[in-house]
Image (cartoon, grey):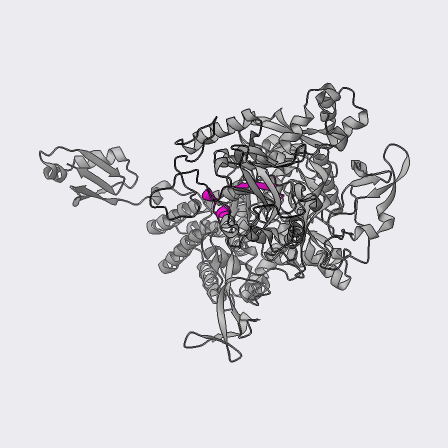
Amino acid sequence: MSEAPFRYTAEMARSIEERWQKRWDEDGTYDAVNPVGPLADGTAPADLPEKMYIMDMFPYPSGVGLHVGHPLGYIATDVIARYQRTLGRNVLYTMGYDAFGLPAEQYAVQTGTHPRTTTEANIANMRRQLHRLGLSHDPRRSFATTDPEFVKWTQWIFLQVFDSWYDPSAANADGVRGRARPISELVEELRAGTVDPFALAERQGIALPENWAGRSTADLAGASEKEIRDLAASFRLAFISETPVNWCPGLGTVLANEEVTSEGRSERGNFPVFRRTLRQWNMRITTFADRLLEDLDRVQWPEAVRSMQRNWIGRSHGAQIAFGIAGRDGDGAGFEVFTTRADTLFGATFCVLAPEHSLLSDVDSLPEAWPEGAKDAWTGGAASPREAVRAYQQRAAAAGEEDRTAEDREKTGVFTGLFAVNPMDGRRLPVFTADYVLTGYGTGAIMAVPAEDERDFAFADRFELPIIRTVQPPADFEGGAWTGEGAKINSRNDELDLDGLDKDEAKRLATEYATAKGFGRARTTYRLRDWLFSRQRYWGEPFPIVYDPADPETPIALPESMLPVELPEVTDFSPKTFDPMDAETEPQTPLSRATEWTHVTLDLGEGPKEYLRETNTMPQWAGSSWYQLRYIDPSDTAHAVEPDNERYWMGPRREGDVGGVDLYVGGVEHAVLHLLYARFWHKVLFDRGVVSSQEPFHRLINQGYIQAFAYTDARGMYVPADEVVEESDGTFTHRGEKVTQEYGKMGKSLKNAVTPDDMYDEYGADTFRVYEMSMGPLEDSRPWETRAVVGSQRFLQRLWRLIIDEDSGELRVSEDPADLPTKQAVHRTIDGVSRDMETFGFNTAIAKLIELVNQLTKSGASPREAVEPLVIMLAPFAPHLAEELWTRLGHEGTVTRERFPAADPELVKAEAVTCVVQIKGKVRHRLEVDPEIGEDALQEAVLAEARVQELIGDAEIRKIIVRAPKLVNIVV
């Protein structure tokens, strides 16, 4: 039997979809209107409709293209954008590409193909795949971070950060204290003596220039112009410092923490990674820690994400305690620790320094021999403290940060031969070095209280160290470290008695005592570290920085007129690599070999001179830290973002509002770093008056993931999932060999990827869209099942048959009025779908549309007043089919901006509902009531019922519980 000639098939879907995509492109259907500039249409800004700015997280243009898991969030945001247009809103919705990145550079190293060539080909393929999906992007606003104009403004923003310092006392919007200000204003403040640079440096953890060591504010008045400028420069928000980094000689580059495995090796190539101190660009994000933390309460984000950011920032209130070294005097003879529990100093029995701590930088300054009392367990089998510490430092340098701090890892360390003096009671405490203490966190030193800390207890147990309890554990405590609450014990000296106090009071008194005695002070610390901002790679944004050969340590900013600084053309894209075990090597970047580019003659105000360019590049995070601003108008050559346009799309809408993108959708894997960096840059731009919004993203949703089955053979190798056969006994085979099924993510490496192109060919884009949106709630992960996609196709085919005759292709819609049951079904669907769209319940919205189609099919009628609202409701999910049907229904314009239908309340409500009346906890009566009845009216109606009065009789009514419209519970 031949197929009906006008059936909605994959072939027909392709024809419809490609035709409508072409028309949308030609008509600019999804163009959003700006208030001013080239993307304005002449409408007065005050007359523009309400706006909606919707964004997906930036995709990286991978060489393998998309699999069906990638578009999940993109389809969802497109559904939202299309729905918002039906509400009459001006919707900004587009897609760009985070195009700098390591994969393209790795491919260039392997093949010699320029990263730009690979990247542009990947973007073209991804853009094709997304366009074929029917996403309603405004194509005029698309860009890649590698575009020269985008690079220019990325470099310009870097210069704004470079030109700023953070004034913690400056007034800011909404009663906030603290603001980024131009460096020139700090120079003026220093000259005027209105800023104490020593106090500010202490507060922000900044090392001042060496020539200011030992000086005071009294020296500011007599300082030279250069001294003042150098002093001010040390407070820049973008700065160069000797920074602990993950140095990988085998790759010739510094790696981010997330690029280092738990075994302390590079994720790429499996080379050893060493902790080294190298000159690197950093951004002083730590100065914004309080604002980054407190403004989390002003954005509409998932609580899990806000919690992750709070933990990453890690604000702790406590005390900084100074420990002297027994037998040593003078500056540098001791160390400081930060503790949130100064009251537990009485329980400190040893101290631990990070292997990289400055006190251990000169190992030869340690004792030549083991002091009396050193136990064998402390020595690591070495003949002297110097030998032990030197060997331990070498081992620690090869361990990754994650591995060093793993909770379940056996504690290692060696005694340094030094003893610290406990400032609270004068006891001598052995000082160890151990790799679980890091220089990048706190002070790089800890006082160990093993009775109240599990990590310290494990170390004390391993190294035979004493344990002193300062908190009374409960009677049934079985031993180990007690980390709970309890009264203070063993916590007194001749001047301070904390015994019997609770934790908070003991902390307060101990901190006050330490401050009064001069060995401590109250302090707030943060887990957040400054942002390491340089990479030893080619494929990244060049820094807009040069150096005078006569002063190669001082960075010089290029003027805006010299931007963008573009990458030179090179043939060798790899950094110089070294012996993988040679930790003492130094990075040599690909750019450093382009000598014609690195040596440049410029006129920076002193006539033409030769300068040296910065040869590091920015990290991939740079472009994604501000791209939300560039979508507003990427054609603007005069601004990173035009102020009036930014104010319209991102500005605050009410007093106290932080503004930002209305809706941002992406994976939870970016919950910390990307969002934190973007917030930091945005706040700097707000402080400098570039933007009116205080936050980049007002509302955030994390979509779930498409997951799939993968299969491994006896060797543990993945086999193609589409070639696996499920046997009758429930096992799986591949080419006759038994394989093991596992469930998880989808990807090329797992050989279980299904591409959108496969779905377009087999079913059409609209069917694919409906299937992904019907699989479950947006935030939930869900399993992919190709065989289930046909269900969504059948739904669309049934809907098509309601309107189009499959045999003739003629319209089969009736102009007759719909009967009451049909009207009620339509309006209840409108009401339900409207509610679902507002809460992103797309799966339940589709279920309601399916139910309506089934009801109309069963009725055998297709009245226009039923099918037209059905088509409009369908349009966000299956836009091509909706456009086609809308046209066949006789409409000339696009369905895109047709108003979403409004439900008639009279047709939505049920005619009556049954209210149950309980007396003494048992159902005693029922009555039919209006479904919209209020609680007071329902109580009055129930009490007026003769049967209810009869049941109550003379009993006293003690309480009436009303749950309108379905329940009244009378307690007598």
Residue 440, magenta (yes or no): yes
Is residue 297 left or right of 679 when viewed as pictured?
left
Near-viewer residue (85 or 480): 480
Residue in the image at 16% along x and 35% along y = 944
Q: Position of residue 266 (x, y in %)?
A: 65, 57
**Image height check: is 407 above or below 640?**
below
Q: Position of residue 661 (x, y in %)?
A: 57, 40
Near-viewer residue (30 or 367): 367
Residue in the image at 71% along x and 46% along y = 364
Quadrant in which residue 175 is drawn: top right
Is residue 34 left or right of 726 when viewed as pictured?
right
Is residue 389 left or right of 881 when viewed as pictured?
right
**Image height check: is 487 above or below 542?**
above
Which residues are the magenta region?
A: 438-457
Q: Position of residue 374 (x, y in %)?
A: 57, 48
Is residue 879 left or right of 452 when viewed as pictured?
right
